[in-house]
Each structure stands twice: as structure tokens, then as C-alpha cells.
Image (tube, grey):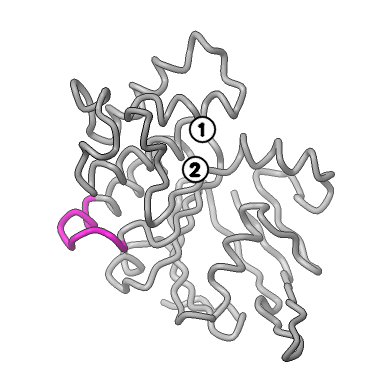
Amino acid sequence: MLSVANLEKTFHTQAGDVLAVRDVSFVAGTGEMVAIVGPSGSGKSTLLSLLGLLDAPDSGSIDIDGTELGSLSASQRTEFRSRQVGFIFQQFNLIPNLNARENVELILEYANWPKEERSERAEEMLKLVGLDGSKLERRPSRLSGGEQQRVAIARAFAAQPPLILADEPTGSLDRATGQKIVELLRRTATQQNATVLVVTHDDRVAAQADHRFEIEDGRLTEKP
């Protein structure tokens, strides 16, 4: 479960202070998919960075499965992020000289999974997202956009983190493939007991989430 309370973040620039996230509070349950929509510059990326421990808030709290992130030291934050948060990027961010299975294994290595379990777990996750056989041995350049996104999803879920953050996960895909990816995210969230938070410009993606929020000028509002 993800619980956010009174979160704020200000950036200090030459042009003046910019309050990027203003008093944001919300709760997202295990197995749920949450969508956040909003125009460019509305605070979406900043909020994602705060939730993913890539940046620290000025005030407020973030609790992931009972751990309040503000209580962690810098080294503990790094360790927590590698084990408890999975990232899905718009441009996939796969390692080009590693094949599909190795890309997933790498995140398990970072999460300190036993070496003898990594290959089996990677293949299990890739099969879950619909990739198996010879495709496991293919490098990203030999996979379609939809297949690369499936590898990225398998990689994000592989270490069983309670929180998955997805930045425009369908932005580079055609409509049909994007729909399959959204369905896959929802299904995998349920099967892996994870909370999935999706930042998107696509209202069709947002409409399929369990909860839909809109952010504008750093303020978050839940939409029906």
C-alpha cells in the first residue's frame, strides 16, 4: 500500500521559487492501479521522483507498506529503492547489449537475489508478460516496441516490489499494443500484490485505472 500525506516540494530558481508539489495526499491499495494525468509542467514528474526516492520532499510523508521514507538514511533510501520500487520508463531503458532474460536478471542482481534463483525468476516473469522461447535470448534491437515494453514490465515486477512507478508506459506504442500493456499492468499488479502508479497523458489509459487523479500547478485532485 502507498500512503502519501501533505507532500510538498519547492524548487528555488533564479526566476523565483516554484512550488512543484502542493499539499498532495492520497492512498493507493495493494493490487490497485492509479493514474495521474496533467499537462506538462503540472508536477507529474516531480511527484514521480519523490515517490521513487529520486528526490526528497520539503515536507509531508510517503509510506510504502509500513515504511515511512522520511525515516530512512541516504544509504537506506538507496537500498529501499532497489528492493521496494520498480520503474517502467517510457523509452524502456533496456540495456542494449543484454538479452531479454539478462535485462531482467540484472535488476534481481541489484536487489541481491541469490544468483542461482535469478535466471529462473527472470524466465518466470517474462513468461508472465507473454515472452518465452527464443525471444528470451534476443537483445532489445531484435524485439518490437511492445515486446521491449513487456521486458521492461517484467524487469520492474521481478524483485516483487510493493510499488511500481510507470512513466507514460504506452506513450511510444500504438493504440492496440498500448491497450495490451495497460491490461498487462493491471493483471500483473493483482498477481504480484503490487501498487501500480501510472503517469500518463492518455485519458484512455487513465480511464482503466482504479483511481484517477489530475494534477495541475502541483495540486492533486481525484476524479470520478
Q: Which mark is residue 194?
A: 2
Residue at (58, 75) in percent of width and height: 43
Tags 1 and 2 touching, CB below 8 Å: yes
Q: Nearer the viewer, mark 1 or mark 2?
A: 1
Earlier in the chain: of badge 1 and badge 2, it is 1
In the displayed structure, 187 sits above or below 159; it is: below
Q: Which mark is residue 115?
A: none
Tell me where residue 129 appears, x and y as whole percent: 28, 36
Residue at (49, 43) in percent of width and height: 194
List the single residue furthest toward the bottom. Answer: 15
**Magenta part of the protein: which range?**
171-180
In the displayed structure, 197 sits above or below 87; it is: below
List the single residue furthest toward the top. Answer: 116
Residue at (33, 21) in percent of width and height: 123
Secondary structure type for disc 2: loop
Residue of label 1: 160
Residue 174 among magenta residues? yes
Q: Residues within 10 Å of mark 2 (few under 14, many from 20)?
A: many
Tell me where residue 222 appears, x and y as whole percent: 51, 76
